[in-house]
Image (cartoon, grey):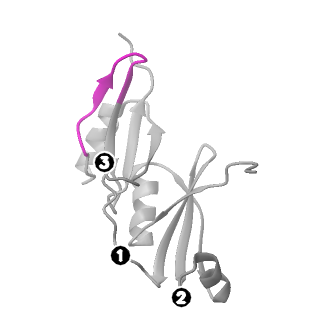
Amino acid sequence: MVTSYNHTSFTVSDIDNSIAFYVAQLGLTLTRQWERTGPEIEALTGVAGARLSMAMVECEGFKLELIQYVGGAGVTLDPVINNVGAAHIAFEVEDVDAFCRRLVRNGVKLYGTPATLPPPRVRGVYISDPDGITIELSEPRIDD
């Protein structure tokens, strides 16, 4: 039986690029960076030759582990949100439109445009991290 949440993880192509995105663009905090290699990590992952460069970024109790397979890397998947098996994470922001304007100025890709959903009124948008992983940004309460 599961007893608690621990973390969420994404495999990324470039650990430094991903850290820069999640810290500089989204404002998460880098709390740890390390490497894993050896027979134990090969056994855990089931990947021969696995050598991992890893980082943990956090926001309000949410832990996102970023993993780059420096050794034993696989193929790049297409994580577009409508593909079966695709996932996304969501963060709340104070002003989704202003946040998006800043991200676009910094070269971040938006999948669509900010939209306000019907009650309960939420304004949100999907964006892409450097590897195409979808992130939802939402402004939870919009005044009518």
Name the amino acid, label 3.
Asn
| First along the sequence among labels 1 and 2 | 2
- Which quadrant does the C terminus fall into? top left
Find residue 118 and report its horizontal and vertical position in percent. Answer: 34, 18
Q: Secondary structure at mark 2?
A: loop
Q: For the magenta stretch, what is the residue range?
A: 111-123
Q: Which mark is residue 75?
A: 1
How many residues crowd mark 3 within 10 Å: few (<14), some (14–19), many (20+)?
few
Name the amino acid, label 1.
Val
Q: Which residue is mark 2?
A: 48
Work out how far the residue at label 1 is from the one at label 3, CA to CA, in angstroms: 19 Å
Q: Nearer the viewer, residue 21 or 118?
A: 118
Q: Which mark is residue 140?
A: none
Find residue 125 and report its horizontal and vertical position in percent. Answer: 32, 37
Q: Is residue 89 above or below residue 131?
A: above
Magenta stretch holds residue 119: yes
Q: Secondary structure at mark 3?
A: loop
Q: Is residue 60 above or below residue 15?
A: above
| First along the sequence among labels 1 and 3 | 1
Q: Residue at x 40, y 78 (%)?
A: 74
Q: Residue at x 40, y 16 (%)?
A: 119
Find residue 93 and report its horizontal and vertical position in percent. Answer: 44, 35
Magenta stretch holds residue 10: no
Magenta span dominant secondary structure: loop
Name the amino acid, label 2.
Ala
Work out how far the residue at label 2 is from the one at label 3, CA to CA, in angstroms: 31 Å
Q: Which residue is mark 3?
A: 82
